[in-house]
Image (tube, rainbow, N blue to C red):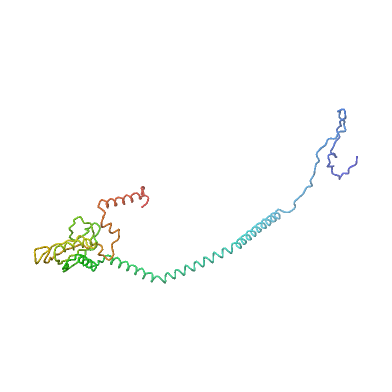
Amino acid sequence: MSRRTGNEAPTTGKKGFWSMSIGGSKSDGSTSGDEVVEQEAVTTHLPSVNLLPVRIRESIAIARSRTVLLLMVVLLAAGSTALWWVQGDAISQAEDALSSSQELNDQLSADIATLAPAKNFYNEVTRLEDLVSSTLADQPQAQAVLARLDQAVALTGGQPPVAILSAAIAYSGIPDPGGELTTCPNPDPFNTEITIGCLTFSATAANRSQVSDLLRAMEADPMFVGPFVTSTTATGTDTAQAGTVTFTGSAGVSLEGLQSPPSPELLEAILNPPSADDAEGEGADGAGAEGAGADPDGDQP
């Protein structure tokens, strides 16, 4: 057994200074007094002392925090710069497009201001054109009516032919919806044709047969509505086949006597005007619709 000096540390093995032989076991199971009991090794640490003052330690901690904060700011600035550099091209193109659009808008606004007088002139010409068209649409064709009367006379034939002594047209215009369809004398009380005026004429014929032929020719012409003879006077002889017959007649002038026919909507309103009951029903429906759309609680005005 070796000798230890006073400065030696205890042995850190499984068997060392602190191992103690208590007894041993023999082959017959008995224990001897030389048996060694193993114990865990003990590790010692040398004491240490922080001799820095508290103020210095706090200064070091603050400086370290400032360094970390400065590093974060630098990283953030670097990231923002990189993002701006990556998106700089797209932003520049968008700014250029915006500038071009603003310039185009300014140019269009200047052109509109320059062309404003021309636009006003065009609108005025269009309004006058519509006024002239609507005015001429109701203008009658007097010459056409008289020409169609001559055509009906030519269809009668006979010798001597029928001769028109005088003719006159009194125009009443297109009737209003719900008004009288015709103001001319008409032998058919149930006639539903629209007239815009009345043609009156006086003529001579060789006989009453020519007068009848003239009436039939006028009835076949859509220009005339309800032609009839108001009076006849036979001169020279009492027979129907000789002498001269002087007669007067009239006929309504149909819509064909206008420069332009009225619209289909106006014709429908003239021929089938709404009755008073229908008008009241429409008014009630309108009131009901307004009532249905109103707020039941009265919250809305």
Taking depth in this image into account, of 93 and 253 the one nearest to the observer is 253
Taking depth in this image into account, of 76 and 64 the one nearest to the observer is 76
Q: Is residue 277 left or right of residue 95?
A: left
Q: Quadrant of residue 37?
A: top right
Which image quarter is the N terminus in?
Answer: top right
Number of numbered discs present?
0
Q: Position of residue 164 (x, y in %)?
A: 17, 68
Q: Is residue 52 above or below residue 88?
A: above
Taking depth in this image into account, of 21 and 113 the one nearest to the observer is 113
Q: Is residue 87 left or right of residue 54?
A: left
Q: Position of residue 64 (x, y in %)?
A: 68, 56
Q: Position of residue 178 (x, y in %)?
A: 24, 56
Q: Is residue 35 above or below residue 283?
A: above
Q: Is residue 126 left or right of residue 14?
A: left
Q: Position of residue 168 (x, y in %)?
A: 18, 67
Q: Is residue 71 above or below residue 296?
A: below
Q: Quadrant of residue 114?
A: bottom left
